[in-house]
Image (cartoon, helix red, strand yellow):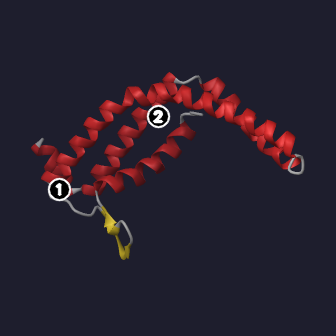
Amino acid sequence: MELIVNIVREFPLLGIALFSFVITLLLTLLYKKFTNQEKSKERMEKQKEFREKQKQFRDEPQKLLELQNEMMQMSMEQMRESFKPLLISFLPLIFAFGFLKQVYTDAAIGEIISWQVNLPLVGTGAGWFLSYVIFSLIFNSVLRKVLKVY
């Protein structure tokens, strides 16, 4: 643990970036394994078609309502399917965040990413958690495209 704290103390930005990448990669692979990717891809294509149809039927409220009901059904299916990987990853993720909090507290790292403006709610920079969120959003987008996760 002391070795990790010393590395984080020396390279806090690199440490949180690596942690974010590893966790995001594991979560993405877990999601890919426990969801039906073919069905997910089909749903995405259908949603795209529905958006096009919505533009066509803008002046026909009855057809628009039917389309919205179908889209709602697909969204519910997608949510049900993504619930399993969420349940599997929840507890390990809580432990990982506890570990990360302990490491960054022991290393006495405050802001990892700083900006010159004092923003409401976040202040003048990002601590370990906000930095994790920023990096994981970026890595999630890239990894989903590279690994073809739908």
Left or right: where does residue 104 sit relative to residue 33? left
Residue indicated by mark 1 = 9
Residue 72 against residue 130 in the figure, above or below: above
Residue situated in front as seen by the camera: 8 or 43: 43
Q: Provide residue 92's location: percent of width, then percent of height.
A: 30, 31
Q: Is disc 2 placed on a helix, strand or loop?
A: helix
Number of labels in the image equals 2
Q: Provide residue 71's location: percent of width, then percent of height.
A: 71, 36
Quarter of the image that includes the N terminus: top left
Quarter of the image that includes the C terminus: top right
* Residue at x 72%, y 38% (from the top left corner): 47
- Name the kind of residue labelled 1 in the image: Arg
Left or right: where does residue 143 sit relative to residue 58? left
Residue indicated by mark 2 = 28
Residue sitting at the far left: 2
Quarter assignment of residue 30: top left
Left or right: where does residue 108 sit relative to residue 57? left
Quarter assignment of residue 88: top left
